[in-house]
Amino acid sequence: MNQEVHNAYEVIKQGGIILYPTDTVWGIGCDATNPEAVAKIYKLKQRAETQSMIVLMNGEKMMYNVFKDIPEVAWQIMDLSENPTTLVLDKPRNVAPNLIAPDNTLGIRIVKEPFCFKLMEKMKKPLVSTSANISGQPTPKSFKEISPEIIKGVDYVVNLHREKIAGKPSTIIKLTNDSQVKVIRK
């Protein structure tokens, strides 16, 4: 695993995009602070930049680097969630502008999955994560369901967990700084 973390990090550091296993489905990712790399993912997915992507983080420190104000309920939801949960929070900063939704929000998920966690530890930055499919196509449940177009379109494919069948994508909950909670995807 350490070799794969190193290989992925080297590609990301150069502004490349990777195909990698997450705690849910296979994802396409890059340095969340690099707008050019983010643009490559939108192009590969044939996705409008108004359809935002989520960002993975490895802990509280990284979250506070991106959000000045985090509602208390966010920590409670993350502590109580048994399944991977993406939170959409207000007023992100220190990330590529083309990741921020038109309503000035950003979806984030704290991951414990060892590969992702170690990669972000090395990057010291959040990691973009979007499902490994062309926009509008079904989300692949395993590596073998990922289209050749996606595999050829990334700069590096992580060689881990290729046999794993994914669970469902994360739950998505939108939290506003004025304490409104809205479940977007169960």
Image: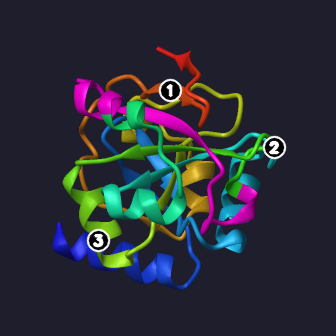
Q: Residues within 10 Å of mark 3 (few under 14, many from 20)?
A: some
Do the CB atoms of the residues marked 2 and 1 lie less than 8 Å apart? no
Q: Which residues are magenta?
A: 76-98
Q: State which quadrant residue 158 falls in.
A: bottom left
Dot 3 falls on a residue whose secondary structure is helix
Label 1 sits on residue: 172
Residue drawn where x is 53% and y is 65% of the image = 30
Image spot of residue 48 (x, y percent) = 82, 44
Q: Residue furthest front?
A: 178
Q: Could you tell which of marks 2 and 1 lies nearer the N-terminus?
A: 2
Q: Is residue 122 left or right of residue 98?
A: left
Which residue corresponds to mark 2? 102
For disc 1, the neighbor class at 10 Å (few under 14, some 14 to 19, many from 20) is: some
Q: Which one is in front in this view, the residue at disc 3 or the one at disc 2?
A: 2
Identify the mark at residue 107; answer none if there is no mark: none
Q: CA distance from mark 3 to mark 2?
A: 29 Å
